[in-house]
Amino acid sequence: MENNNDVFMLGGHEFHSRFILGSGKYNSHLIRAAVEYADAEIVTLALRRANTRPEENILDFIPKNVTLLPNTSGARNAEEAIHIARLARKMAGTDFVKVEIMRDSKYLLPDNQETIKATEVLANEGFVVMPYMYPDLNVARDLANAGAACIMPLASPIGSNKGLATKDFIQILIDEIDLPIIIDAGIGRPSQACEAMEMGAAAIMANTAIATAGDIPMMASAFKDAIIAGRKAYLAGPGRVLDKGGAASDPLTGFLR
Amino acid sequence: MENNNDVFMLGGHEFHSRFILGSGKYNSHLIRAAVEYADAEIVTLALRRANTRPEENILDFIPKNVTLLPNTSGARNAEEAIHIARLARKMAGTDFVKVEIMRDSKYLLPDNQETIKATEVLANEGFVVMPYMYPDLNVARDLANAGAACIMPLASPIGSNKGLATKDFIQILIDEIDLPIIIDAGIGRPSQACEAMEMGAAAIMANTAIATAGDIPMMASAFKDAIIAGRKAYLAGPGRVLDKGGAASDPLTGFLR
Amino acid sequence: MENNNDVFMLGGHEFHSRFILGSGKYNSHLIRAAVEYADAEIVTLALRRANTRPEENILDFIPKNVTLLPNTSGARNAEEAIHIARLARKMAGTDFVKVEIMRDSKYLLPDNQETIKATEVLANEGFVVMPYMYPDLNVARDLANAGAACIMPLASPIGSNKGLATKDFIQILIDEIDLPIIIDAGIGRPSQACEAMEMGAAAIMANTAIATAGDIPMMASAFKDAIIAGRKAYLAGPGRVLDKGGAASDPLTGFLR
Amino acid sequence: MENNNDVFMLGGHEFHSRFILGSGKYNSHLIRAAVEYADAEIVTLALRRANTRPEENILDFIPKNVTLLPNTSGARNAEEAIHIARLARKMAGTDFVKVEIMRDSKYLLPDNQETIKATEVLANEGFVVMPYMYPDLNVARDLANAGAACIMPLASPIGSNKGLATKDFIQILIDEIDLPIIIDAGIGRPSQACEAMEMGAAAIMANTAIATAGDIPMMASAFKDAIIAGRKAYLAGPGRVLDKGGAASDPLTGFLR
């Protein structure tokens, strides 16, 4: 049951895989396995990761057909994010950028207002801007108006593996915003990724859930399958839920009516 | 990432697919598609379904390599269930039987005590007894002692699609009972099936969730993928969950510490 | 807003307070304060507690107008429970008995089937039988037929403070059984007691939640208020819940329509 | 168990009641009963409500010792909110103002950025500014810096009665912000108000949950009790929660160990 026409668009580019893999927290040898088992077409990359140690460049471990998505991890405001984005474009040779702006390192929650500012500047410079944000409908509208290619709301605090703590508000974004909604941060298990896809998310970004698993390649494969499952369920249209009582699945044999 | 050695046993028989499909609620033409997309090795069958209309026998629509699992749907007590099981063995030529005993047709909740009695009798007659039950640890122990081949607790009332309403108590069964725990009844979406597998369930039985979906074959395929994903996640070992705060996925660029 | 006519009946006796206090886990000096702050009319008592140390009898610390409810804590089957109940009647001079039968000390889950047997024998001997049970509709019906004065389903494992893990099935008991449903075991916080009362429970039994709190009398008082609040909400009839969107509480000023 | 010293401060004023009542959606005759049964010291009021019909002024129905809290309901941006606040100060003779700024009437979600702007201007003009906001930690910090007297995060969309959909993020505000956190919007039942208070909220604002109940004065009374219960539980310090298993409440009688 493969459907090659079920794609989503980011900045005019077409993607089939709905699983975006983070590259942080892996050693270089594991990242290749993770990408392969995840069947990922997009992999995020922190600027520092790309250039810190020349003797072991993580880029060498990422398959060539994969789209690199540099992020602005560590930026505290729009100005810093814009600066990192421009550097990353030079180094990685891509227009894609994931804007991440955080004020503090305790909860690492995105600064929505600075993210809007950076998105506007970078979109005007031709970047394909993928903004990480706290799921607030008004902010998502501003990001769309600022030229974002998609909206990347958090499910729960980054690295927490706590799952869909913002579920009701992510559903509002999916219902109201006419851009791909990509769930970023907090997804801890494949079942949570599956549920987000059932709700109508366009894609899932995960990193810590895989990097902290016991068997990294197998967990990458589990997420891949769960995301595909959730997408199929969304397309198939879910069954009805009973409010009360039960309903027999089988014709009863004549004893029970 | 296929693992052909990851099997579970029922009555000495080895199964690879962890998705058991119910056949109720389908028309005969859809059942074949559902079985194929589900990649099911076991399909349940109500006695009445097998013999009601000779001009259209549902058995003709089920692939020959699939294990038929007759159920005792409609039985109100142990005696009726035993009677149906014996009839089903004659008609379907299989020792497998799913014992379902319900007192009323409003909630269709299993009668645990009568189920224990029927399990004991049928196990002594050489049946591979798969008892549907309300997830009660003491009853699961009695069923194991009575000779059950597995334990089939409900997730929520049959046909309700309400998901894992009994989650904490199913986890207790998984932790304490040394038989396959197969989740039966109430699973409404692939993400719920995935979660049950992550918890350590051996397999999932679904029927209404697929039969009431908009696109039946696609939903069958979604469940198949989700169950595989959940199994992989269980085997991989999930990542840790933070109680509070967040944790950076990426090395920070130097602005934020 | 006191309603002196809002009572519930147990064995022909009328009770106003819907908070039943467990006496286990307290030292004797705290039990009096807890009873007073809880405004409890019924207090449970384990047999061993009543007679272990003659120099400090817990009965001396319980106000005289409180109904003692001996329990059969420690009984592993109907026979032991019946034996303890008869002893307790002699010692405490009351017909009330809470039947608790558990097979093991890990999860301490009630043995429903032995509980039905003990209930039948004790009800025939004139006891006011209050059976602690795992919330199974069929078992609740059997207990009612056996002569139980109420049904006492667990919310989650005893002493766990995990709250309403069996919520959907407790609601079924409330809807289907024509006896007071008293929630026993697992209620960890006043908000959970309040929610159970909103659902239509007749009363709440708590012990560990109070005994392990930082300030025992204040937590007893908190539970008392929460139970009263939940009862009022049930009687008042809750407001409607929106499926999607919001609804203005105030007339808008003319700017926003 | 009354504690007259347990107060919270708003703009230098001391309040004992932690229940703020909304006045929208009531007819004038019910508002007085609601205020009395709620034991509210603060009641919100929309500007339009105060002056629309001279022949029936809602102010006549609100007891004189109650603090009026005019809101800016209907404002779409900071400018409109500031305008309404100034008018309200003149009409109601109070410095208190609840800033509500919403862009659309479907979800009625607050515009955090405009709310920060209005808060800054009004705080500088000497208002006691109580801003309604979407629970975003960065925004709460900005509001505190702008001079807010408290932070009023929504629990779920206004008028929805859906409860604590933003629970994890409200907990972050309580833990991180050194101002009273008052839960506003979405609280649908007393148990939810109780839970928010157990988490450490300073007060609860409710309107629709009471106005749409079957018996308005009784539901107001239920909320009052539940809020007091939750406050006591927070002060008492909750008991520990078991991760797995159970723990006997009573000494076992000797049969079960």
Image (cartoon, coloured by chain):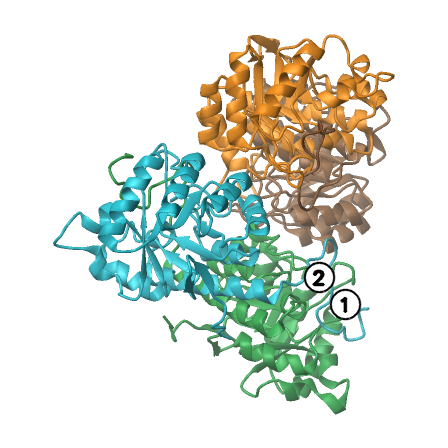
Chain colours: A brown, B orange, C cyan, D green
Q: Quadrant of the C terminus of chain C?
A: bottom right
For the point 65% across and 76% down, the residue is D23
Whether residue C109 is visible to the viewer of this picture, yes or no, is no
| Label 1 neighbour load within 10 Å: few <14, some 14-19, many 20+ | many
Q: Is residue B130 left or right of residue A135?
A: left
Q: Is residue B26 above or below residue D166?
A: above
**Disc 1 designates what residue?**
D76
Whether residue A139 is visible to the viewer of this picture, yes or no, is yes
- Closer to the chain start, of discs 2 and 1, is 1
Q: Is residue B203 left or right of residue B172?
A: right
Percent x, y of residue C88: 26, 48
Q: Are marks 2 and 1 in contact (CB under 8 Å)?
A: yes
Give whichever of D39, D16 is nearer the camera: D39
Q: Amino acid at mark 1?
A: Arg
Residue placed furthest toward the bottom: D55
For the point 33% across and 42% down, the residue is D248
